[in-house]
Image: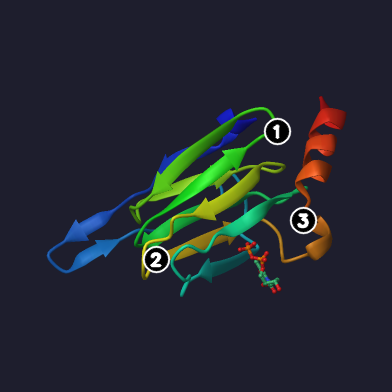
Amino acid sequence: TIDDCKLIKLDRFYDTRGSLTPIYNQVHIPFDIARTYYLYDVPGGMNRGGHAHKQLQQLIVCVMGAFDVILDDGTRKKTVRLERAYYGLYVPRMIWRELIHFSSGAICLVLASLPYDEHEYVRNYETFLKRKQAQS
Ligand code: TYD
Protein backbone atom coordinates (compact mmCIF):
# COMPACT_ATOMS: atom_id res chain seq x y z
CA THR A 1 0.00 0.00 0.00
CA ILE A 2 0.86 3.64 -0.04
CA ASP A 3 2.22 3.30 3.51
CA ASP A 4 5.06 1.22 2.04
CA CYS A 5 6.21 4.29 0.11
CA LYS A 6 8.79 5.81 2.40
CA LEU A 7 10.76 9.00 2.38
CA ILE A 8 14.28 7.85 3.24
CA LYS A 9 16.71 10.33 4.74
CA LEU A 10 20.13 9.72 3.23
CA ASP A 11 23.55 10.60 4.61
CA ARG A 12 24.86 14.01 3.75
CA PHE A 13 28.55 14.77 4.06
CA TYR A 14 28.67 18.51 4.16
CA ASP A 15 31.65 20.83 4.49
CA THR A 16 32.90 24.09 3.02
CA ARG A 17 33.49 22.28 -0.31
CA GLY A 18 29.84 21.31 -0.58
CA SER A 19 27.72 18.20 -0.03
CA LEU A 20 27.96 14.52 -0.93
CA THR A 21 25.38 11.75 -0.59
CA PRO A 22 26.23 8.04 -1.08
CA ILE A 23 23.66 5.26 -1.62
CA TYR A 24 24.38 1.55 -1.11
CA ASN A 25 22.36 -1.47 -2.21
CA GLN A 26 20.48 -3.09 0.71
CA VAL A 27 21.70 -0.41 3.14
CA HIS A 28 19.85 2.77 2.23
CA ILE A 29 17.45 1.00 -0.12
CA PRO A 30 15.88 -2.49 0.27
CA PHE A 31 16.97 -3.72 -3.20
CA ASP A 32 19.95 -4.02 -5.54
CA ILE A 33 20.24 -1.34 -8.20
CA ALA A 34 20.05 -2.79 -11.71
CA ARG A 35 19.75 0.54 -13.53
CA THR A 36 19.85 4.26 -12.95
CA TYR A 37 18.37 6.98 -15.11
CA TYR A 38 17.57 10.63 -14.71
CA LEU A 39 14.96 13.05 -15.95
CA TYR A 40 16.09 16.54 -16.89
CA ASP A 41 15.20 19.40 -19.26
CA VAL A 42 11.56 18.91 -18.25
CA PRO A 43 9.62 21.85 -19.72
CA GLY A 44 7.43 23.85 -17.33
CA GLY A 45 4.00 22.32 -16.86
CA MET A 46 5.02 18.87 -18.15
CA ASN A 47 4.34 15.71 -16.11
CA ARG A 48 6.31 12.44 -16.07
CA GLY A 49 5.46 8.97 -14.88
CA GLY A 50 1.79 8.12 -15.14
CA HIS A 51 2.28 4.40 -14.73
CA ALA A 52 2.96 1.57 -12.26
CA HIS A 53 5.42 -1.30 -12.35
CA LYS A 54 4.47 -4.95 -11.91
CA GLN A 55 7.67 -5.87 -10.05
CA LEU A 56 10.13 -2.99 -10.16
CA GLN A 57 11.02 -1.05 -7.02
CA GLN A 58 12.72 2.30 -7.15
CA LEU A 59 14.17 5.19 -5.25
CA ILE A 60 13.36 8.63 -6.62
CA VAL A 61 15.76 11.42 -5.68
CA CYS A 62 15.46 15.06 -6.59
CA VAL A 63 19.16 15.93 -6.96
CA MET A 64 18.42 19.46 -8.20
CA GLY A 65 15.38 21.72 -8.06
CA ALA A 66 12.04 20.37 -6.90
CA PHE A 67 8.98 18.42 -8.02
CA ASP A 68 5.96 16.62 -6.54
CA VAL A 69 5.30 12.89 -6.71
CA ILE A 70 1.68 11.74 -6.55
CA LEU A 71 1.47 8.16 -5.22
CA ASP A 72 -1.65 6.04 -5.65
CA ASP A 73 -2.20 2.45 -4.47
CA GLY A 74 -5.64 2.20 -6.08
CA THR A 75 -7.36 3.07 -2.81
CA ARG A 76 -5.49 6.06 -1.42
CA LYS A 77 -3.34 8.84 -2.82
CA LYS A 78 -0.68 11.03 -1.33
CA THR A 79 1.61 13.72 -2.65
CA VAL A 80 5.26 13.97 -1.62
CA ARG A 81 7.32 17.02 -2.47
CA LEU A 82 10.96 16.30 -3.21
CA GLU A 83 13.33 19.24 -2.99
CA ARG A 84 16.43 17.96 -1.16
CA ALA A 85 19.19 15.78 -2.59
CA TYR A 86 19.58 13.92 0.71
CA TYR A 87 16.05 12.47 0.71
CA GLY A 88 14.91 9.59 -1.48
CA LEU A 89 11.36 8.40 -2.03
CA TYR A 90 11.14 4.61 -1.99
CA VAL A 91 8.36 3.31 -4.25
CA PRO A 92 7.54 -0.43 -4.11
CA ARG A 93 5.91 -2.46 -6.89
CA MET A 94 2.38 -1.69 -8.11
CA ILE A 95 2.10 1.91 -7.04
CA TRP A 96 0.79 4.36 -9.60
CA ARG A 97 3.02 7.46 -9.65
CA GLU A 98 3.00 10.81 -11.37
CA LEU A 99 5.72 13.42 -11.23
CA ILE A 100 4.43 16.96 -11.55
CA HIS A 101 5.30 20.60 -10.81
CA PHE A 102 8.93 20.37 -11.95
CA SER A 103 10.87 23.50 -11.13
CA SER A 104 13.04 24.85 -13.91
CA GLY A 105 16.34 22.96 -14.05
CA ALA A 106 15.07 20.14 -11.81
CA ILE A 107 16.85 16.78 -12.08
CA CYS A 108 15.15 13.55 -10.98
CA LEU A 109 17.50 10.64 -10.36
CA VAL A 110 15.90 7.18 -10.31
CA LEU A 111 17.55 4.05 -8.92
CA ALA A 112 15.67 1.00 -10.17
CA SER A 113 15.72 -2.67 -9.17
CA LEU A 114 15.31 -3.99 -12.74
CA PRO A 115 16.53 -3.23 -16.26
CA TYR A 116 14.15 -1.37 -18.55
CA ASP A 117 11.36 -3.63 -19.79
CA GLU A 118 8.22 -2.16 -21.33
CA HIS A 119 6.28 -5.38 -20.51
CA GLU A 120 6.88 -4.67 -16.85
CA TYR A 121 4.91 -1.39 -17.00
CA VAL A 122 1.22 -0.89 -16.32
CA ARG A 123 0.49 2.26 -18.32
CA ASN A 124 -3.31 2.09 -18.31
CA TYR A 125 -4.96 3.32 -15.09
CA GLU A 126 -8.06 1.11 -15.48
CA THR A 127 -5.80 -1.93 -15.91
CA PHE A 128 -3.91 -0.85 -12.79
CA LEU A 129 -7.14 -0.65 -10.75
CA LYS A 130 -8.27 -4.05 -12.01
CA ARG A 131 -4.93 -5.63 -11.10
CA LYS A 132 -5.13 -4.11 -7.60
CA GLN A 133 -8.67 -5.40 -7.10
CA ALA A 134 -7.61 -8.87 -8.26
CA GLN A 135 -4.81 -8.86 -5.66
CA SER A 136 -6.96 -7.94 -2.68
P1 TYD B 1 8.77 6.82 -20.01
O1 TYD B 1 8.60 5.53 -19.27
O2 TYD B 1 7.63 7.32 -20.84
O3 TYD B 1 9.23 7.95 -19.01
P2 TYD B 1 8.45 8.31 -17.65
O4 TYD B 1 9.10 7.47 -16.59
O5 TYD B 1 8.61 9.74 -17.43
O6 TYD B 1 7.01 7.93 -17.86
O7 TYD B 1 10.04 6.63 -20.95
C1 TYD B 1 10.32 7.55 -21.97
C2 TYD B 1 11.10 6.83 -23.06
O8 TYD B 1 12.36 6.39 -22.58
C3 TYD B 1 10.38 5.62 -23.58
O9 TYD B 1 10.53 5.61 -25.01
C4 TYD B 1 11.15 4.46 -22.99
C5 TYD B 1 12.53 5.01 -22.80
N1 TYD B 1 13.25 4.44 -21.63
C6 TYD B 1 14.34 3.63 -21.84
O10 TYD B 1 14.72 3.32 -22.98
N2 TYD B 1 15.04 3.17 -20.76
C7 TYD B 1 14.66 3.48 -19.48
O11 TYD B 1 15.32 3.03 -18.52
C8 TYD B 1 13.51 4.31 -19.28
C9 TYD B 1 13.02 4.65 -17.90
C10 TYD B 1 12.83 4.76 -20.38
- For disc 2, does the CB lie below 8 Å from ligand 1? no
Taking the view exactly as shown, the residue that stands out farthest to the top is 136
Question: Residue at 33% of width from left, 53% of height from top?
Answer: 84
| Residue 74, label in figure | 1
The answer to whether residue 84 is seen in the rendering is yes
- For disc 3, does the CB lie below 8 Å from ligand 1? yes
Q: Earlier in the sequence, mark 1 or mark 3?
A: 1
Q: Position of residue 20 (x, y in %)?
A: 30, 62
Query: Considering the numbered disc 1 on the image, is that residue within a helix, a strand or a loop?
Result: loop
Question: Residue at 58% of width from left, 41% of height from top?
Answer: 71
Q: Is residue 128 left or right of residue 73?
A: right
The answer to whether residue 25 is seen in the rendering is no
Question: Residue at 83% of width from left, 44% of height from top?
Answer: 127
What distance separates the C-alpha of mark 1 from that of mark 3? 16 Å
What distance separates the C-alpha of mark 2 from that of mark 1? 28 Å
Q: Quadrant of residue 33?
A: bottom right
Q: Quadrant of residue 66?
A: bottom left
Q: Position of residue 43 (x, y in %)?
A: 46, 71
Q: Is residue 107 above or below residue 1?
A: below
Query: Considering the numbered disc 2 on the image, is that residue within a helix, a strand or a loop?
Result: loop
